[in-house]
Amino acid sequence: MKILVISDIHGKKEKINLIKEEAGKADLVIFGGDFCDITNPDSGDEILKELLHCNENLFAVIGNHDEIDFKDTLEQYDVSIEGSLSSFGGLLFTGSGGATPFSNDTPNERSEDCIVGDLKQVLSSDSGGGDRAWSNLVLVVHNPPFGTDCDKIPGDIHVGSKLLRNYIEEIKPVLVVTGHIHESQGISKIGETFVINPGALAAGEFAWVYISPDGKSKWNVEKIDLMKK
């Protein structure tokens, strides 16, 4: 499966032109949050509609710059994976939006407990759980986990969630997609789990993920390409 991973466009609709052709070639597009410009909350609607014109197979969460009720809009268009479990091509997807308090001036700041709680509530209630179940799971979480190449601000300071990292170590998904920290386009691993921050599409950054099953119900990340235009 060929997945286009994007995040943090912040209302810059013109940046969609950078990935429009790529999106048309993708099996699936994942958006890691922050659709809108914080000074123009309505800009998220235009971004969402334009992305769906590029590829109707879209899964997304909202970011800390998005208004909380924008999640309802994602649900109306059937692209939200926040607090729910969706499937596509044999993979399972769930996610959690917003970010932990940092600047305290964005509309969707949440505690680590709330962010991880979204994931726990969905995954613990799934009747198909078990030791093996999450080898085909992709988490999409706007706030990055702690201690990777995906959560560093200038000065090499890690600002991700320790609670989220602990949970990833526990459930061992095949892939975690994050965003939020524009300076940290990167790829890391937590155990056998790949963690990717595609960077900010507002800055022309995105990523490709190539992932496939091994024939025994387990999925593997074959390659990740970080891109910038």
Image (cartoon, rainbow, N blue to C red):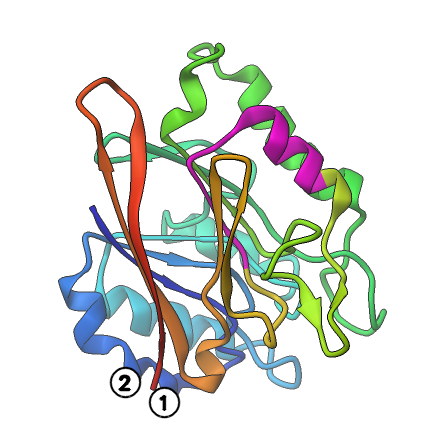
Q: Is residue 218 a member of the stretch shown in magenta?
A: no
Residue positioned 19% across, 52% down in the render: 27
| Residue closest to the eye, 156 or 8 | 156
**Is label 2 in a helix, a strand or a loop?**
helix
- Could you tell whether 41 is left or right of 103 in the image? left
Quadrant placement of the C terminus: bottom left
Q: Give coordinates of residue 201: x percent, y percent.
A: 44, 77
Q: Which residue is denoted by mark 1 in the rendering?
A: 14
Q: Which residue is denoted by mark 2 in the rendering?
A: 17
User: Which residues lie in the magenta part?
Assistant: 164-178
161 over 219 or under it: above or below: below
Q: Which mark is residue 42?
A: none
186 over 136 or under it: above or below: below
Asked whether the residues under the numbered discs 1 and 2 touch, taking CB atoms below 8 Å apart as contact, a structural biologist would say yes
Q: Give the amino acid at mark 2.
A: Asn
Question: Which quarter of the picture shows residue 68?
Answer: bottom right
